[in-house]
Image (cartoon, helix red, strand yellow):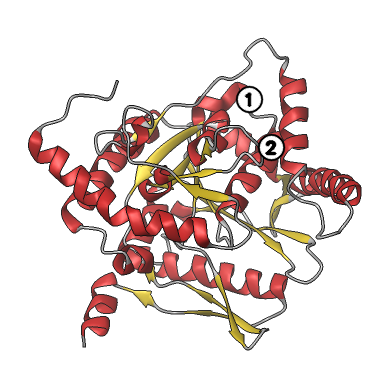
Amino acid sequence: MSTPISPELLSEEQQLHASYNGWSADFEARPDNGLVAIEYDTDLYPEQSILVARSDAEHIYPWLPDNVFHAALQYKVGKSLGKLSSSRLINQVDGQLTAQRFVNQFRNQETSAIDPTPLIQSLREAQLEGQNTAVLSPHFKLSELAYLKGLRFVAKRDRPNIDKSGAILNKAISRVAYASGGKGKPKPVKKHFTPMGRGYWSAPKTESSLFWGVPERPSRRVNASMLGALIKQDMKDGGMEVDIAPTGSEIKPQREGKKITHYEIPFIDIAAAGLMTRFDNILTNSLVRNPDSGEYTLYIGQLKSVSELKKTMSDEEIVRSVFEDMRVAVEGMVQKPVKYKGIGSIATLVAAQAA
């Protein structure tokens, strides 16, 4: 049963989900993402409630030894990482080899250009010292966020630390699920994240939220609740490692005819993106699939101390610097120009669209 809700909040919740109807249908219509729209029903899907700011981590198969759990998770991620081949066997074998290669890449990655400490060790030590780390993942498809988290989770052998792991999820994706591919029931997106940590539900200001007319008042309420759960509770206790999709929307290829000319990063709202400066550390990573060969490439950035960055930069300068680093990294991966649609105040975008 869902939590009892006042008439005022119920009205706001209904307004929010009315705007999600078209958005979830659009998710389903996008090619090759495997998503289907699901109904607005807080009894079936409690995370859809405007009152739910956080979904707890799910300790699935607690009887399973950690090493077996991590191996099973790596196998599951690997099933989705194969090249685009007509042979299912080739896809499966390539996917498993790719997953192992990426896990090794995480384990062999140095912390930074000036710190040769293994990144995985630095991330573990940061959590033990009570530091909070934001892991920023610009993405082309929603599924890539779960793949990235899964690969890093396996590399860190993070199951014992699951309650100190999390991901910020857009409340809009509470209205979509991954199709089973058979007769099984579609699996809500949340279920692809909560076996690896907590889910924090937000309603960010993005181009997509503007396009679909997501109402302001319930969005503010959702975000205030999310920040309360994340910053005032979990980050106050310390040691959190939280995955964030900093663009809020997918990076989109721009075409002339069938040819991809460049990629476009959606408009970035400085105020919303500024959440990253509330953490102690920032790490960037990204997973990109070549549209021709189907081969994935993994980028892992440097672990940066926010306190060190603040010695020479304002919060806005930090945000701009981090996003520029990500833009350059993605550009190197896709071998095409990568451009921002804009970066600044969302109010500026609203005014420009109204003009």
Q: 4 above or below 99?
A: above
Say whether disc 2 or disc 1 marks the residue closer to the N-terminus.
Answer: 2
Please tell me which residue is depicted at 69% across the width and 37% down the height of the picture. 121
Which residue is pictured at 78% across the width and 72% down the height? 292
Give left or right: position of 265 versus 87. left
The residue depicted at 77 percent of the width and 21 percent of the height is 68
* Kind of residue at disc 2: Gln
Which quadrant holds residue 208? Answer: bottom left
Which residue lies under the disc numbered 2? 121
Q: In the image shown, does 45 or 94 lie closer to the viewer?
A: 45
Q: Position of residue 13 (x, y in %)?
A: 21, 43
Judge left or right: residue 41 versus residue 126: left
Q: CA distance from mark 2 to mark 1?
A: 15 Å
Q: Position of residue 235 (x, y in %)?
A: 39, 35
Q: What kind of element bears circle 1? A: helix
Image quarter in which the N terminus is found: top left
**Residue on which disc 1 sits:** 159
Q: Position of residue 32 (x, y in %)?
A: 64, 59
Q: Nearer the viewer, mark 2 or mark 1?
A: 1
